[in-house]
Amino acid sequence: MNTLAKITLTETKLAFRTPGFVLGGLLLPTAITAVLGAIPGIRAESGTTTGMRFLDAWVPSMIVLTMAMMGLQAIPGIIASYREQGILRRFATTPVHPAQLLVAQLIINVTVTIGGVGILLVTAGVVFDVPSPRHPLGFLLTFVLGTTAIFGLGLIAAAVAKTSRAAGGIALIAYVPIMFLGGVWLPRPLLPEVVRDIGAYVPPGVKALEDAWTGTGAQPLQLAVLAAFAVGSCVVAAKLFRWE
């Protein structure tokens, strides 16, 4: 087993000893969807979601929740705590590069994100008959770009914070508007049109996810802006990052 695999296995074991974010990322969006799906009115077609049920329109927002939890809450706090505790500094004195620890954490948290979205889609489809995205490739591309952008923003917070508490506070600058614009706190069909338009062009691309569902397909400009966010956030995080 190579070094990265060993570190990833060790970090996975540590993550399951304090499983709050792991279980939250895997199960919370599905649990919220299940609670809402139990309400008959939510399963009925709504005048604000033409051609769709309110529940169908809600699922992309739950994907946003999964991304935001793992990318803007879990990963910044974990990495900043390692800096705060001197773990990154100690790694720097060994043949193992600290970057491998960061890669291991990214692997774990991205895997939880993918798993949480997978559980959500399967449960919503099987239990509540929520249709699958009509443009699966567009959905996949948007998901990859959105996840990269969100985790890049999370890494920026981790890059500049000296403590886990500071990292959480910095990440909130992105977390709050992303949750609002993504329709997590108030469903997007109920948001003012100008707010929906803004949300169409910021990570993690909830409008592109919605368009992949309805069959209209994501607009090239939406994907281009999302890609710019993804590349830009990762470059900035790499430039700002310090091990100590």
Image: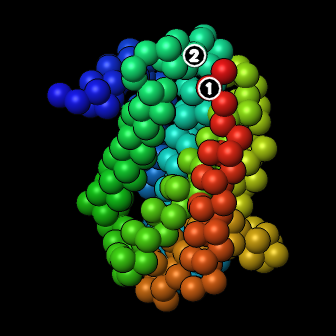
Q: Where is residue 126 in the image (x, y as percent from the top left)?
A: 26, 60
For mark 2, what is the residue? 89
Task: Please report the residue visible at 46 percent of the width from the left and 51 percent of the height from the top.
Answer: 33
Q: Which amino acid does label 1 sit on?
A: Trp
Horizontal relation, residue 137 to residue 78: left or right: left
Question: What SS does tag 2 mark?
Answer: helix
Amino acid on which disc 2 is placed: Arg
Residue at point 51%, 55% (across, down): 147
**Element under label 1?**
loop
Q: Can residue 37 be seen in this view?
A: yes
In x, y percent, where is residue 80? 63, 25
* Residue 117 image offset from top left, x and y in percent: 39, 53
Q: Quadrant of residue 232?
A: bottom right
Residue under pointer 1: 243
Question: In the image, is 153 to the left or to the right of 74?
Answer: right
Look at the picture and state if 69 lies above or below 180: above
Most foreground residue, 102 or 97: 97
Instruction: Answer few, some or many: residues within 10 Å of disc 1's Cα (few below 14, many 20 plus, some between 14 and 19).
Output: some
Residue 146, given in percent of the width and then of the height, sits at 54, 61
Mark 1 near mark 2, Cβ–Cβ under 8 Å?
Answer: yes
Compute the Cα span from label 1 to label 2.
6 Å
The answer to whether residue 87 shows anywhere in this view is no
Mark 2: few/some/many CA within 10 Å (<14, 14-19, 20+): some
